[in-house]
Image (cartoon, grey):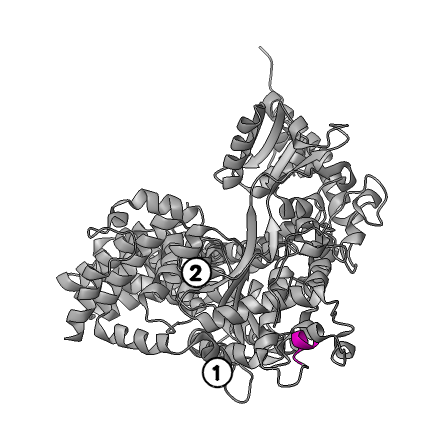
Amino acid sequence: MQEHDLSWVRTEMVLAEPAPLGERGAIAWVRKNLVGSVGDTILTILGIAIVAWILPQVINWAFINAQWTGPDRTVCTTAAQGGIQPEGWTGACWAFVNAKFGQFIFGTYPIEERWRPILVAILFAALLVPMLIPKVPRKGLNAILLFLALPVVSFFLLSGGVFGLPVVETPRWGGLLVTLSLSFVGIAVSLPLGTVLALGRRSKMPIVKLLCVIFIEFVRGIPLITVLFFASVMLPLFLPAGVTFDKFLRALIGVSLFAAAYMAEVVRGGLQAIPKGQYEGADSLGLGYWQKMGLIVLPQALKLVIPAIVNTFIGMFKDTSLVLIISIFDLLGVVKQNLSDANWATPQTARSGLVFAAFVFWLFCFGMSRYSMYTERRLDTGYKR
Amino acid sequence: MRFVNGRQRIVNDAGPGVGPNGSCIHKRKKIRAAWEAGGACKAEKGLWVMKHIAIGIFGAAALGLMASAASATTLDTVKQKGFIQCGVSTGLAGFSAPNDKGEWQGLDADFCRAVAAAVFGDGSKVKFTPLSAKERFTALQSGEVDLLSRNTTWTINRDTALGLNFVGATYYDGQGFMINAKKLPGVNSALQLSGAAVCVQSGTTTELNLADYFKKNKMEYNPVVFEKLEEVNAAYDAGRCDVYTTDQSGLYGIRLTLASPADHVVLPEIISKEPLGPAVRQGDDQWYHIVKWTYFALLNAEEAGITQANVDEMKTSTDPNVQRILGTEPDSKFGTDLGVSNDWVVNIVKAVGNYGEMFERNVGSGSPLKIARGINALWTKGGLQYAPPIR
C-alpha cells in the first residue's frame, strides 16, 4: 500500500484555464465544422472544389471580362459576331444594362420628368429609414406620413396634372418604379386590411364573418394571373366603349386585395396561437373589443407571425412581375422588353440583363428578410427556444 | 323599356355562326385552347356572346353610352385626343422594340408614325401600347387602341369573325429554316434536310407547318421540341439540333444572339404564308381608308423615287404622277377626300421616309438584322409590294 504524502494540501481553487488549442479558435472551428467526420471531409472537399471551379469563371465573366460602357452591340460581340472583342471572349455585357439603366428604373417615364420619381424615392427613403430605426421618436406621426400622406403625394407627383406638372400616364411608368409602387401599396394596404379580415373571420357576428370568409376563400381560390388577366382583358369588353379605367390602378387593386387575403390567414394563425387566458384576462380587466385586440392580443399575435408576414411580403414583391402578362412592365418586364432591341442583340445580352434584374430583386428581398430577423430578435421576450 | 331592348339583343342577335344556344359557350376548353393560340373563331365568338350578356347585365345605361360612343368616327376621336393610340408588340427586333431612350423603333412602330403624320402632319403624335399576343385583338375591339400594328398575320378568320380589317401586308413573312453551315456543309436547300434534328417551339403553328412540309416532301425529321423560345435558342446554339425553324424575320434576330452568327445560314425556302400587316376595327370605312392609303402612299413614294431627303425638291417636280402623289397638282383634293390634308404624303415621307427607307432602316441593311428585301421588294423589282395608284 502506497503512503500518501500529506505535506502539501492545495488551499485555493485552481484558476480556470483557457480551453486547449484544439478546442478553440480557427483550428477547432475547422476541425468541428469542416473535417469532423469522414462524411464531412468529403463534403468539404466537394464544396471547395465546386467553389474553386465556379467562382473564377463567375468573377471572370462578371468583372474581369465584362464590358461596362459602349454605344451598341459591337462592344459585347467578338469579331466573328460583328463586334470588336477577340475570338473566344465571353463576359458580361454591363454596357447594355448601362445604356438601358434609366429604362430599367423608370420605364418609359419621360427623361425630363424623371426628377419626379427620384423626389418620390427620396421622400420614401426619408420616411422609411426613421420608421425602421426603433430609437427614433414620433413613430405615430411617421407612420401617418409614410402610409397615408406619401401615397397621395406620390400619386400626384408621379401622374402630374396638378401644380403645372405635365401629365404622365401610367402606361409610361415602368421598371423598378412600378415594382416598388405596386409592392409598397400592396404592403401598406394588405397588412391592415388583412388584420381586419382575420379579426372578421374570427368574429362572432355572423354576417361579418360570412363576408370575410367568402372574400378570403374566393380570392385565395383563384390565381393572381387570372385576376390580372380578367381585369385587363375581360373588363374592357364589359365596359361601354370608350370608357377605360386605368390598367395600372386595376393591377394595384388586384395585387393589394390578393395580398390582403393571404395576410388575413397569416394573422389568423397568430390569433389562434394566443392562449384563451389572454382574451379572458383582457375581458376581466373590463377592456372593450378593440382595446382587447389592440392592447393585448394583436401585439402578441403579430409578433408571433413576423416570419410569415415577411414571407408574404417577399412573395408579393416577386409576384408583381406577373403584371407583365397584362403589359405593365415592371423591372423584369422592361429588361425582357429591351432584350428585343436589335442594337443590343448579342449572346451575352439576355444573361447580363437577367442577372442584373435578379440582383436588384435579391437586394430588396434580402433586405426585407434581414430586417425581419432583426425585428424578431428585438421583440423576443422569452419565447426563444 | 330600354332594358327589354337590351335583353332582346342577347336573344336575337346571337352573332354570326353562333346558334341560339350560343354553342361556343359550352366549349370552354376549346375556347381556352383557341384563346391561347392567339385567338381563333370560337374564342372570339364566345367572347362576343359574353360581351352581349354583360351588356344585358349592365343594362340600358351601358347600351346608351355605347351607342353614343360608336357614333363618333375614329378620325374624330383621334383628332380630339390629339394623338393616335397604336398597339405594338411587347418587343420584336426590327418591328417594335424600345431603343436606349425608351422610344419605340421598328417597322411596325414607324407605320404608326406614318399614320400620325398623315392625320396630324406630325409623326410624333402617336402613343404606343405594347400588347401581348393574347391581348391584341381585345385591345383593338374595345377601342383601347385605334390601330393595331403588331406583326399580326392576315387571315380570313381575323378579317371576318374577329371583326378586324387588315389594310395590307407591310411585311411578307413566312416560316423558314436556319442551319449551321459548318456542321452541314453543302446544304443550300431545305429539301436536303431529310433526317435532320429540327429545333422548334411547341404548340405553335410553326410546329404544324414543319410536319406538313416534311410529310409533303416525303422526308424524315427529328423534332426537338421546347416550350420557350429562349430554350429553343439555347438548344440550337449548343448544337443539339441541326436546323432551327420559325418565322424568317425572327431567324435573323436570333442569328445575332448566336455565338458565331457567320456560320449560320438562313435557307431560301419559305414554307408558310405569314403576311404581317396593320389592322383596324370594322365599321369605320374612313379610318380604314386613311390607314390603308398611308400604306399605299409609302409604296407609291418609293416607286416614284420620293425619299425623306428629296421630298422638298420633289414638290416642285413637273412629273404629273409625283404631283398627284404629293398633292402639288392644282385643285388636288385626294387628301381632303380621304379626310386629311392635301400634303399628307409629304408629311408621311418627311416623318418616316418611303417604304424602302423604312424597311432598310429597321430590318434591312441599315439595321443589325440585315434582312434582304426579297419578296418585300416593290413589284417593279420582282417583289410583292404593289400599291394602287394615287389618281
Seen from the viewer's position, the closer of residues B53 and A105 is: B53
B215 vs A195, left or right, is right
Q: CA distance from mark 1 to mark 2?
A: 23 Å
Seen from the viewer's position, the closer of residues B49 and A95 is: B49
SS for callout 1: helix
A81 vs B113, left or right, is right
Q: Amino acid at mark 1?
A: Gln
**Residue A347 belongs to the span the image colors magenta:** no
B223 vs A294, left or right, is right
Q: Quadrant of residue A7?
A: top right
Seen from the viewer's position, the closer of residues B95 and B172 is: B172
- Of badges 1 and 2, nearer the viewer stands 2
Residue for point 56% across, 51% down: B275
> x and y percent of residue A214 in the render?
22, 57
Q: Is residue A260 visible?
A: yes
Judging by the rendered image, the residue that carries numbered circle 2 is B164
A292 vs A16, left or right, is left
> x and y percent of residue A229 in the render?
39, 56
Disc assigned to residue A330: none
Disc assigned to residue B80: 1
The tag earlier along the polypeptide, 1 or 2, is: 1
Is the residue at mark 1 from the same chain as the one at mark 2?
yes
Q: Residues within 10 Å of mark 1 (few under 14, many from 20)?
A: few
Q: Residues within 10 Å of mark 2 (few under 14, many from 20)?
A: many
Q: Amino acid at mark 2?
A: Leu
SS for callout 2: strand
Numbered range of the magenta stretch? B323-327
